[in-house]
Image: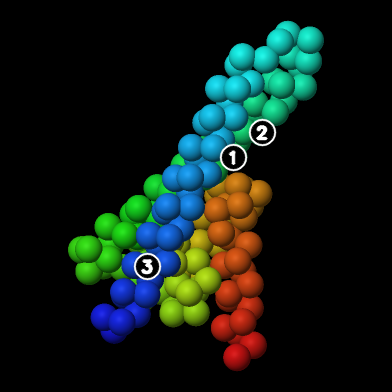
Amino acid sequence: MTGTQLIRFNCQLNAKRAELLRSIHTLRNSMAIDNRGDSLDRGRKATDREIVLQNLSLESELLRRVEGALQEIQEGTFGICATCERPIPNQRLQAVPWSPYCVSCQEAEEVQAGFGMMASLGGESAHAGSRSIRSS
Ligand SMILES: [Zn+2]
């Protein structure tokens, strides 16, 4: 991978990190507001709160991955699959730059973790990415 590519991924990841930090901040604020609400629609608020908590945990996980990828850029190990240690194809990195795995290791993990959760973490676009690799 060239220095220019790394700089571009670094920019992309920093932008994603800022976006996630903003979003997590907003989610936390919305929970604080919920806590002050009256008790009449407590049931609905409890459901809202669960959704917010779910989003918070997904975004925190994604943030963890983005920060991990930024760390890898610093250490010079960015773009290497964390499981099989082979280089991750460029098309995949462009689609999901924070993914620590290549497509086949990601798919293996999705089977273990349950697809729904992984899809929200970029599994969906990872699949779109793998399709475009095959068709090109
Ligand atoms: Zn792999």
Q: Quadrant of the C terminus?
A: bottom right
Q: Is residue 91 above or below residue 73?
A: below
Q: Which mark is residue 129?
A: none
Q: Secondary structure at mark 1?
A: helix
Residue under pointer 1: 55
The amino acid at mark 1 is: Asn
Rendered residue at 59%/29% (across/down): 30
Residue 11 — which label?
A: 3
Disc 3 marks which amino acid? Cys
- Looking at the image, is 122 positioned above or below residue 30? below
State the separation of the CA atoms marked 2 and 3: 30 Å
Q: Position of residue 134 (x, y in %)?
A: 60, 85
Residue 117 coordinates in the image, percent (x, y): 60, 47
Is disc 3's CB within 8 Å of ligand 1? Answer: no
Q: Residue at x 56, y 47 (%)?
A: 113
Asked if marks 2 and 1 touch (Cβ < 8 Å), the reply is yes
Q: Position of residue 112 (x, y in %)?
A: 55, 49
Going by the numbered disc 2, the residue's amino acid type is Ile
Q: Earlier in the sequence, mark 2 or mark 3?
A: 3
Residue denoted by label 2: 51
Q: Is residue 19 left or right of residue 117?
A: left
Quote the CA–CA distance across marks 2 and 1. 6 Å
